[in-house]
Image (cartoon, rainbow, N blue to C red):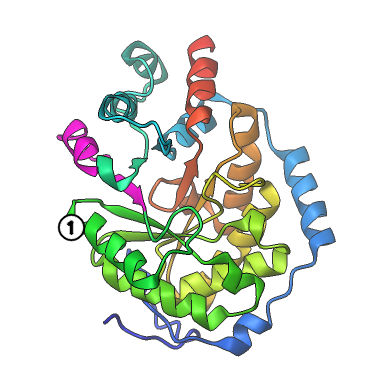
Amino acid sequence: MHKNLSVFSNDHAPAGARNPVAAFDAALINAQSVDEAEVARAVAAFAEQAPSPGAPQLLNALRCIDLTTLSSDDTPERVKALCAKARQPLSRDKQAALGREGITTAAVCVYHAFIGTALEALAGTAVPVATVSAGFPHGLSPLRARVLEVKESVAAGAHEIDIVIDRSKALTGDWQGIYDEVCLFREACGEAHLKAIIGTGDLGTLTNVAKASLVCMMAGADFIKTSTGKETVNATPEFALVMARTIAFWRKSTGYKVGFKAAGGISKAKEVPVYLAIMQSVLGDEWLQPNLFRIGASRLLGDIVETLERS
């Protein structure tokens, strides 16, 4: 089992230390409250102040993309083509012109069946393979099956495991139930990093978004992630701001850093600056790097590349 910490220990976590499992704190979770009108005003201000996307911003966003295919008609050939894009998302000539050679995306995310295909296609690179797990996208299959699914994906070689919480538990206030399940997923991950999808668009309120984010960090998540990409509403700047503020609270309270992933709903380069502005303002420059910031929006890659190639 992982070390179980008091939430407020703040015992000067070693540089680069992984977020451990902390003790469940119902009072702290229940104390979370988000002023939705204030969040809307803050997001409007970020959107107004964010600059037009320039090459440095777009290159950074490109480096933070989890290039993903999660379709029912996926094939090994499609996954191999995706991995080729991940290895070289931008032409060598353009990379050289921008002075940023060797750029890759942050990761490739596929279903369990294609982990081996992706590992082979990415051999010789530092691009990790991520896979969705734990009853994705709904998280409603039997718990034992969800835990086994995580273990099987780790055994198959996945470096990152994107699990999804049972949103019914969030909607009924069963935060202990979510914590207990995510703790099991974290243990099943071993050395693989755990990205916890909270399904923001299904949670009803921004207060629930904050509570679900906090619970997953208590349970040892390495990243908290907005969406599966299959909800009616996926990533939004409002969700990003609430989750970033909750990560900042966690960092201040415990000393540990947790990453953020905006997934789904971001398809245009012009949408990127507001997310980068939120990360930078709330969390600092550290959270503009792939180890702490991801965008799960594969359509975005094409628009960024097209924008950069025209510049």
Q: Position of residue 30 (x, y in %)?
A: 66, 83
| Residue underneath mark 1 | 155
**For the C terminus, which image quadrant?**
top right
Comparing 174 with 219, the one in front is: 174
Residue drawn 34% across the image and 49% down it: 131
Which of the 4 quarters of the picture holds residue 241?
bottom right
Which quadrant holds the N terminus? Answer: bottom left
Residue at the image position 56 percent from the left and 41 percent from the top: 264
Q: Is residue 84 left or right of residue 221?
A: left
Magenta stretch bounds: 115-132
For the point 68% across and 32% down, the residue is: 51
> Does the stretch in magenta take in 284?
no
Does residue 17 appear anywhere in the picture?
no
Of residue 23 and residue 274, the one placed in the foreground of this image is 23
Where residue 242 sits in the image (x, y, percent)? 66, 61
243 relative position to 104: left or right: right
- Is 28 above or below relative to 116? below
Q: Is residue 122 magenta?
A: yes
In the rendering, at what x and y percent does residue 292 appear? 43, 53
Where residue 199 sits in the image (x, y, percent)?
Answer: 57, 57
Q: Residue at x 25, y 51 (%)?
A: 158
Q: Residues within 10 Å of mark 1 (few under 14, many from 20)?
A: few
Res 205 quadrant in image:
bottom right
What amino acid does circle 1 point to?
Ala
Q: Nearer the viewer, residue 215 or 148?
A: 148
